[in-house]
Amino acid sequence: MGLVFRIATPEDLPALVRLEQQCFTTDRLTVRSFQWMISRAHARLIVAEQADQLLGYALVLFHRGTSLARLYSIATAVEARGLGLGKRLLERIEACAREHDCAYLRLEVRTDNPTAIALYERSGYRRFAVLHDYYEDHTDALRLEKRILQHRETRSISVPYYQQTTDFTCGPACLLMAMGALQPGRALERREELQLWREATTVFMTSGHGGCSPQGLALAAWRRGFRVRLQVNTRGPLFLGGVRDEHKKDVMRLVHEEFCAELDSSDVLQVLGGPLDLPRLLADGGQPLVLISSYRLTRSKAPHWVIVTDCDEEFVYLHDPDVDHSQHRQPMDCQHLPVSHGEFAKMCRFGSGKLQAAVILYPAAMPL
């Protein structure tokens, strides 16, 4: 009987756990993890079996709203090694990623596993990072990536990555990344992340701490010596529709009005409406922060800031400062996320009013 590849089912759990114990001594997936991957995760678990014996599996995770997939784990039974099963599983995963409209497949591999590294590199994967002390036994990991649809990097600017440290500082985290891109070597520190939030927040959420408005972020960048373009499609205070308490609405209006008064006395270029021409903004040396609806990434209806790192004819590339560990993501999963232009156009409209907002930073000496 020949080798069969199929989607895993709950009935495969005992065999999957046995295979996991046979192949790995650390960082093993548990029964609960396999159950979640099969039944609930935005993922695909493929198994290879022959004569009712499970000989291998490969698990790929998809990043919702983007064209990125991650090979989370791959394993082959001892008796199946040397038969090319690992390569065949990898090919199946790549085909699965294409079916999900993914342009990139990323993975981690132990630095002390030359056989696996050789397999990936023969298959077209390139090294682009080393993750120190990554595994439970403190072994480093190589981070590899394969572009299923070829991409040519178009920018000379390298955007550093900074993960937000609170639930409400996505805007300041993106502003730190933008300033770091335009001033290489600039420290990205939590002290400044929180200071930026204090300067830019409008306290718009119904409870707890509020996020940052485009006007507040533009002013915070301008105060630090950058040239700034602020582009929004509405003049009034933002996010009032999500607040019931009239006192909180009054606070938001007052903060917004003060921001607008400060902007009018600054040299921040304010643009009302119009398309966000990312290719031109990037070509002109700008570093755009864009407000999106996080629904298309996490299924939570909240405003969220991301930073654009590049774009080409097919994709817009984003750094997302929010690392969602509940989705088995690492910071590297949130960098240079490829998002189709169509998906990005839907993503960067927030709420029933279709709010669009962007803050674009330029070096201090650059005219707008």
Image (tube, helix red, strand yellow):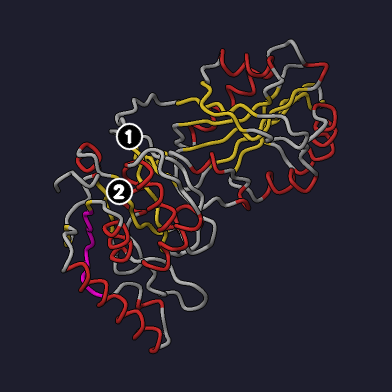
Taking the image as shown, residue 82 lies to the left or right of residue 89, namely right
Three-letter amino acid code of the residue under disc 1: Ile
The kind of secondary structure element at disc 2 is strand
Residue 232 magenta-highlighted: yes
Residue identified by numbered label 2: 288
Q: Is residue 227 above or below residue 93?
A: below
In the image, what residue occupies the spot 26% across and 53% down?
225
Residue 55 magenta-highlighted: no
Residue range (magenta): 228-236
Residues under numbered marks 2 and 1 in contact, where contact means CB atoms less than 8 Å apart? no
In the image, what residue occupies the spot 35% across and 63% down?
350
Q: Which numbered marker is on residue 157?
A: 1
In the image, what residue occupies the spot 40% across and 47% down?
177
Q: Is residue 276 above or below residue 155?
A: below
Q: Is residue 202 above or below residue 300?
A: below
Dot 1 alpha-carbon crowd within 10 angstroms: few under 14, some 14 to 19, many 20 or more = some
